[in-house]
Amino acid sequence: MLLDTPSLYFRAFFGVPETIKAPDGTPVNAVRGLIDMIATLVRDHSPAELVATMDADWRPAFRVAAIPTYKAHRVAQGDAEEVPATLVPQIAVINEVLDAVGIARLESPGYEADDVIGTLTHRAGRGAVDIVTGDRDLFQLVDDARPVRVLYTARGIRNLQIVDEEFVTGKYGVPGRSYADFATLRGDPSDGLPGVPGVGDKTAAALITRFGSLPALLEALDGGVTEGFPAGSRARLAAARDYLSAAPAVVKVAHDAPLPDADLTVPAKPRDPEALVALADRWGLDGPLNRLLAVLDR
């Protein structure tokens, strides 16, 4: 089980009231919410291995070089991500809690959590993988043959949507392996990806279905093929040719991010009990940590 941790702690932050505070009055809503999410996931799905993936770089240079607008609307001062002020200090607490519990926490310099997930999924070979995220970008990793599924959090952690090939095909009209090509054509305003103007979900799905992949579509476009393009789409694609060359480097998650060796086994007991007790006392986390430890012990 691979956790898109930033996606989860943002959901926890906005889903749990900021009135949930430590003894000194510091908000710990994201910390408590994330701990309870992990307890629920382990209880309901019993993974043998568990990884909390992190963003070492939320806006990697290689993606910005390809598409300068990538996440540009989320930039605060300098090149930092715009994060609520009361969430920022909680991220450090989350890291300390995960380490004390013994849940593997992995990141890779210059890469996003999505890339860590892509790399670990690739390394798993034929092993089954569940990816927990609220980010549709990771639908591109769905693969029934292995299987790789996304446990999609849009409806909440207790009402997860199981995203498999059937789900992706039913919703978007393309198989999971084609989702990145589909998303490149359609674009994603939340990530600052413009897509091809005038090409929405239906046209993008029709193009991928007709040509099979974005490289095959571009080969047909460059080769002067005129058949198979929905009305008006060929001219739009030709006008966006530079974007279509650059965007795949942004949309597709990496499969080769360098990662340190780590024990991914779900811990039965906390790695550092003394540190965990200190964290529980300092931040008022007795309740959620006891719930998590009880689940891990089972």
Image (tube, rainbow, N blue to C red):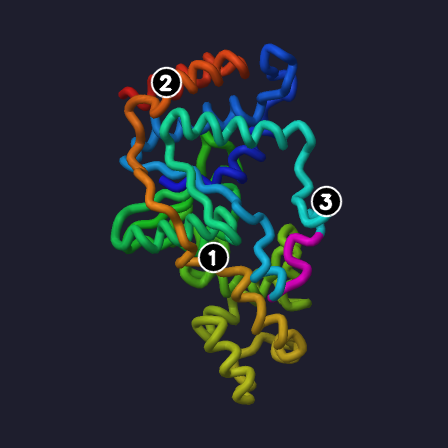
Which mark, by number, is residue 273? 2
In the image, what residue type sits under mark 2? Pro
Based on the picture, tell me whether residue 71 belongs to the magenta stretch: yes
Which mark, by number, is residue 76? 3
In the image, what residue type sits under mark 1? Val
Give the mark nearest the N terminus, 3 or 2.
3
Q: Which residue is mark 1?
A: 253
Q: Disc 3 to disc 2, how far (Cα)? A: 37 Å
- Helix, strand, or loop for circle 3? loop
Residue at the image point whose x is 42% and y is 48% from the top: 117
Q: Which residues are magenta?
A: 66-72
Residue 8 % position (x, y): 51, 35
Q: Does residue 169 appear in this view?
A: no
Q: Quadrant of residue 105?
A: top left
Residue 248 % position (x, y): 53, 66
Residue at the image point whose x is 56% and y is 62% from the top: 62
